[in-house]
Image (spheres, rainbow, N blue to C red):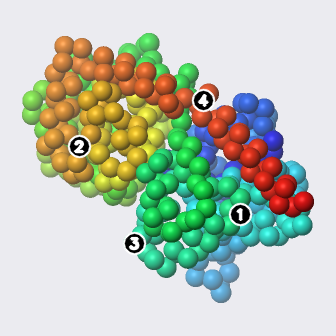
Amino acid sequence: MKIGITGYPTYGGSGVVATELGMELAARGHEVHFISYAMPMRLNPTHDRIYFHEVEVTSYPLFDHPPYTLALAVKMFEVAEAASLDLLHVHYAIPHSVSALLARSMAAPHRLPFITTLHGTDITLVGSDRSYLPITRFSIEQSDGVTAISNYLRDQTIKEFDIKRPIEVIRNFVNCDLYCRPVDQRRRSEWAPHGEPLLMHLSNFRPVKRITDVVEIFALVRQKMPAKLVLIGDGPDRGAAEHLVRRKKLAADVFFLGKQDRIHDLLGLADLFLLPSDLESFGLAALEAMACEVPVVATNVGGLPEVVTNGVDGYLVAPRDVAAAAKFAIQILSRADRGKEMGKQARIDARKKFCSNDVIPLYEAYYQKVLAASSAASA
């Protein structure tokens, strides 16, 4: 198949999933065209079946903001015509599904079906900004296919938008061959030279990720044992986290790595992964850590209970319950094996349900289903 993929080319989970999906599809023989305003992070554009098409947005004095939605629709249409795309797959409803809807209309009478994958904040944020509800509902209803990354998100979408059409749940995935605990653990010594327990967090540092809670949890752990904390990513709350680290006199024990490309080389060096978010529609970072044999302490919200089994491969606590999260972190790190057995179970669970080898065929089958339905409708 020839597939056009659009997502946000940023450090968030939706962009990561869109990019990883495209690369996995290309590895399976499909031709993949990424269409966005910037090269997606984690994308390896050297693959001979992967193409990137940049959306250029021209600013005019008449517009307060560049009309990206329209420019994206035009680029989708142009790429579809030039490359003879079979379908478009857009990640994140606003504005990508609207652009795909316009591109499909421009392509008529030729078929250009599009699939919308819902990732979370494209749905949950609309709940607090009702001005987007009608267009979001319309674009979902008009999509040729709709998927959600968790049962929680599917149910939330149906509830919030009164959606009548079916929504397929295809969960996020991880390349289990790539994400694993590295045999060579020598890089740990950069942060934990004396073999201290190493905690880790990965996110886009948005307020919903509660990066300051990560620091608060670590501070409580640090009171009980020597430990180090590695923070991967960047975003609006980094300054607040750095300030809190200085205020608690933890600067020698906390390392801000910023944005990193080869996440799989880092996660497996940790003893424990922290994800104390206010909300996660899935929790991709938790899954990536689990695949690397790292137990997780996360919050019991959204789709995280579909990823982390409480007491088996990690622990789930109430949002903002820093004390409970720290208690479980200390419990794991105080064990004789420092949580390695729980980490091994985490990888077993990740492999059982979320390996790309099992999930990508679900997308391929869904593509074929949508194409068949679109052909039948055209006929």
Which residue: 40% across, 46% down? 303
Identify the image quadrant of the N terminus. top right
Cα distance in 3D space between marks 2 and 4 = 29 Å
Residue at the extreme left: 223
Question: Pointers 1 and 3 in contact (CB under 8 A)?
Answer: no
Query: In terms of depth relative to the viewer, which is nearer, 57 or 142?
Result: 142
Identify the image quadrant of the C terminus. bottom right
What amino acid is found at the position of numbered circle 1 in the picture? Ala
- In the drawing, what numbered circle is on residue 152? none
Which callout, 4 or 3, points at the residue further toward the start of the chain? 3
Left or right: 111 with respect to 293? right
Q: Report which residue position mark 2 lands on.
A: 317
Rendered position, 135 above or below 378? below
Which callout, 1 or 2, points at the residue further toward the start of the chain? 1
Which callout, 1 or 4, points at the residue further toward the start of the chain? 1
| Residue 363 locus on image (x, y percent) | 66, 41
Helix, strand, or loop for circle 3? helix
Q: Report which residue position mark 4 lands on.
A: 358
Which residue: 74% across, 70% down? 102
Cα distance in 3D space between marks 1 and 4 = 28 Å
- In the drawing, what numbered circle is on residue 100? 1
What amino acid is found at the position of numbered circle 4 in the picture? Asp
Query: In terms of depth relative to the viewer, which is nearer, 242 or 29?
Result: 29
Which residue: 30% across, 16% down? 341
What amino acid is found at the position of numbered circle 3 in the picture? Ser
Q: Report which residue position mark 3 lands on.
A: 128
